Amino acid sequence: MSENTLFRIHPTIGIARVGNSKDYYLGPETMAGMPSENGDGITGGLPIQKDTDSTTILSKDLRETDTGLLKRQAARFKIFQYDGNDTSYPSGGGTEVKVKDVITVNGEQKTVKNILWSVHLANKKANTWIEPPQGLAAFTPTAECPNQSPEIRNSSFGTLLGAPKPNKCGVPGEEDPVDKICCDATSVLGDTNRLKTLVIDAGPQAIGLGSSAEFTRGATNTYYNPSTKKIEAVSYPQQFPSYPAELDKDEKIDSLGSIETDKEGRLIVLGGFGKATGFDNITGKYDPDRILEEDVNNDGWFDDTADGPVTATLEFTDGTFAAAEGNSWVVTTDPSYAPQIRNVVSLWDDVYNTWIENFSLEDNIYDPAKWTTDNPKDKFNVGIGYNPNYKPDFDNQVLPILEAADLQRWAVNLKTAGVNAHDVISQSTVDNPTRTDLLDFIRNPNDTDPNNTPQNSTRMPLSLGDSEQNFLAISRTQYFFMKQWIDGNAESGTRTLGPGELLDRNILGNCLGGRFSPGIEMTFIVRDPNLYQGFNGTKGSIPAAGPFRINMKTMDYTKVPLSDPFLTVGYVPARSNSPVEPGDICKFMSIPWHTDYNSCATHAASSESNMTYWSWPAQRPVAVYTFDDLACYGNLDFQRFSVRGNGTASPNSVDGTEVLDPYAHVGRYQDNTPNQKPEQGRKEFLKDWDKVGFVIQAPAINEITVDSSKIPAMEVMKDYYLEVESQFIDDESNKVLEAPIPASQYTAPPKGGCPHAAAAAAKDKS
Amino acid sequence: MNFRKRTRLLTWVCILALFPIMQSCSGSAEPDDADDGYTSGGSNEGPNWNEPITEPDYANFPEGYSVDNRDSATNQAFHQISWQYFLWLTENVGTEAAPELRFETLFNDASIHPDAEAPKSHILGGIVQAGSNSILIDDNGRAVYTTMMINDIYRDFVQKNNLYTAEGMETVDPNLDFPKGSMSLKAAWKIVGEDDDMTGYYTKEAELYTVVDVDGQLTTSDNLPASEDHAKITETVALVGLHIAVVVKGHPEFLWITFENNNNAPSYIDKTITPDEDMTFFNKGTQFTQCNRSNAGALQVNADQTLSLIGSTKPLTTEALRIHEFGGGKESNVFNIDSINTVVQTAQKGSIWSNYHEVGAVWFDSDESMGMIHPDWSPTVTDTIITGSLTLSSAVIETFTQDDFDANSCFACHNTSQIDLSSGSSLQGSNVLTSHILLQNYLDEIKAEDEIVVRTKRNK
């Protein structure tokens, strides 16, 4: 029996999602697209019903029955016990610990009395840098500019009162301010007035079994004091946007969410309500008429997403306590409208790749000191460090990629040839890739000049890249696993992740990776090893808390100032010794998130090409098959745009003047037409974001009880992923065509026809 | 002086100095690639363009054409035989009163079936361009039509090997090559309007299937079910483009050639330069950003057979632009095409065919060390094997895919890749799949057997 029991919180990073209902369901704990684990035929990624361990939701659970309001998705955190001598990854071990469990701790039998959880939520989106097109490289120190960073948001804030403005070093010859780099912007972010006014900080809250707390304006803040081993109140300088007293409370951002425990003592974290409000970006005063000028970096805006650390201490009935090692982190963000459609490159794939290549995570996979061969002329080059003798576990390390590719069809308007190819590929097994030439069709992430190769425009994934790459490439680790498999060097069932480790992987596996521009949940900072515990500036190792943990700044709530801001500028990417504060993760995301979601349907890959490609289809569905159409027509002959409310039609001409590139703007509220000001289109989505439907596998759709002789038998459609619960009653967008498609393609009206049963029912209710 | 001006001047100097030019000027202008037709000491033979054009010697190619020191075909040789094919195929084999061009006497694509009715009938149809599902619409709002032809070598090969059946395609030896001389053609025809000045174009009276709307997608009436009216009309049409795909010795991948009328459309030069000359498919002053706008699924056909955007009866016009002049490729490729166009057009002065030009041609590198055609090959697998006009499109046959890397090379679509089907099964990759006549026929054959509609008719 171990004398060194460790407790860890899983998942290492939890994701909560906004909704405009107070009600909620739990986030999925299986990974999108992966085969059913319990024989019900429902693939992974489906959220979990409240108050259950793992019962997945049905489509009726996505909204409130009476009001149609969109339920929030909660993040659930659990404690796992480990043998402390085992710091390898994956350990394959770990056992969940719940309240009332009798467990052995360092050789002693103990009963868990309580689990004391602490969470601190903040949102620094308005006091941060703009999203840089260069990604992480924008922060990399240079000899001329050791504090290099992108420009900042709200750079005009407070300047009338003498607040400092950043010095723009700029890129020589670059006119676009987005590309400009600043030398001293970070210090400007530390201006006290900025920190006070532009940061939303709800402060810490701590709870135990049976209690709950709100991250709400005026709520009493609490924290777990490790000295007294008690949850104590603290007078904390909360910061929320200021509003006129008479403003309706529903219009105000007064909360970043709440926490509670379930009956087992697990932590449930809920996010905000999807609100966004404007302010004068010079004075900071509330501005109801504030426009949304940009897709990502809107000065003068707040939203109610947030992030922050999660820590826990176990209390035993014998009066002793044990703190969980390190911390987890919770991020609150956009809804997940296609939860079972896996991103080909998920957030997990990026995080895992960062750990493989920068930490001694799995030296049998990657060890640059041992595997030194690099062959850049080989079109299938995997680069230095990857062990040619490693045999990936097909089910764990290859299948998720294949499944993800196969599922894209339910969220994009991929041309038939592509869909058919995915049908064939999805029949692959560990010993039999159905197309041995598959690697020819996959973009190599080690390509030294991917933007200049026409072939790379035809390869997979057929979606857009980031960090100045036109197209998305799977991660180097993913590519290595694929190559080993294609070469006949894969096995099956050889890799076991413990239940906590599975949570880490699955939660992030359900999030967007690859294209961080900036993304949905987290962005390019996940490629920065300095973001994590265990990195010493040059090399990382697995800390006692286990891998994939955010490098939390230690916060001493016994020394909270009376009125000055508690939080600082916080984490700066690409810097060692730059620990992470609450609000430091979401600050890299779009402000507000709605505008980026609306915009990121399809875009041209580069200024040199007229062809448009998808941004984040698995996380931001572009084109969907609706259940209502299936019930009406009995087939899947056509798709509709997922975002299709009043104002989404992209016209060919306005008042006789041709609109250029109308197809570059389909499937979103318009931002380009001569008769519609961009801010109007973006603002419409602020009102309609909750109307977007969900893409759900047919067996989880309640409406199948709708009386329609045209609905196919479940045996036929058990693997259909159909849109349900959309509140866009009429399709007011455009006809969906097979893609990729040129931006200049003329648009046409959408398919009309059948009444939309579910949507009409929702309308009746409203 | 820029390269284009310099080479054009050189060409004209050569023409004035001595004829035939290709011999006299060899070696004097080497823009970049000495192995592509400008090797000193190499042979620059080829047809005498002032003489009646004989059938190209596909069986012994490149014998009699420009070869290098190793007797391998030069880039120039491919363009010589390209022009020779064009002139030979467009030769009047009818009478002066009732002209009939040689290519119009070939078989139609349906004649791969032994029992095809009227195997040499050429009623115009095929208005939807491959790849883009869009239609080139002329100034009068009318669709540009096409016809497809094959020669007897192609037809005999297909029938002998049973490739007109699904079973034949599924069991074909993947390495089976089309024999030398196999040829398929696609001609593009514009309907001549009352006010059109088609001087310089070959025109004729022709039968056309009418444009019809089938479930939101325009097509021609021959695609309606057999029980419906396959209505036809008669119009004067003008030949605006001609694709020639032919197997010559050592090139079973086919040599892919395209010709267009000189007055079809301008070529892209620079974003800032807008041609100020009206052309058949281009109105002066049109910004390049307004050109080649695809229209899949966005069109309706009006009672007068004009096409317009859905919801409008105002006829639409496609403004066409050639994105890659001469199909790009190496500088020597561009130079050679430009030069031979000038030479032949000069030699053919007075002939209607002097108003046409080779846009380009593309084939596999003659150096076998670069590889030969083989099953499961596509440019995505390896593109170094391709040479000539690497980004070749016809501005009137592939109008809308010219800047789509997925479709702007002939081989991007005409390759030997496995074809994945909606049922989750596949048609094995094979060399005969370079021909889309066979591929389309196969898909039509299995569609009759395959009742699976889900996932097949997507977003129509």
Image (cartoon, helix red, strand yellow):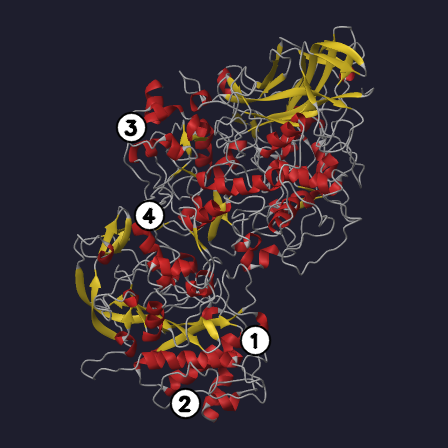
User: Where does label 1 land, which residue?
Assistant: B367
Dot 1, crowdedness within 10 Å: few (<14), some or many (≥20)?
few
Amino acid type at circle 4 is Asp
User: Where does label 3 land, which residue?
Assistant: A708
| Quarter where residue A651 is shown | top left
Locate the N terminus of chain A by quadrant.
top right
| Numbered circle sitting on residue B48 | 2
Question: Which residue occupies 53% across, 40% down?
Answer: A404
Position of residue B5 in the picture relative to residue A527 (left or right)? left
| Cα distance in 3D space between marks 2 and 3 | 73 Å
Which secondary structure lies at badge 4?
A: loop
User: Where does label 4 land, which residue?
Assistant: B450
| Cα distance in 3D space between marks 3 and 4 | 25 Å
Which secondary structure lies at badge 2?
A: loop
Dot 3, crowdedness within 10 Å: few (<14), some or many (≥20)?
few
Amino acid type at circle 1 is Asp
| Cα distance in 3D space between marks 2 and 4 | 53 Å
Dot 4, crowdedness within 10 Å: few (<14), some or many (≥20)?
few
Q: Which chain is indicated by disc 3?
A: A
Question: Marks 2 and 1: same chain?
Answer: yes
Question: Marks 1 and 4: same chain?
Answer: yes
Whether residue B400 appears in this view of the structure is: no
Question: Which residue occupies 44% across, 36% down?
Answer: A681
Q: Which chain is indicated by disc 1?
A: B
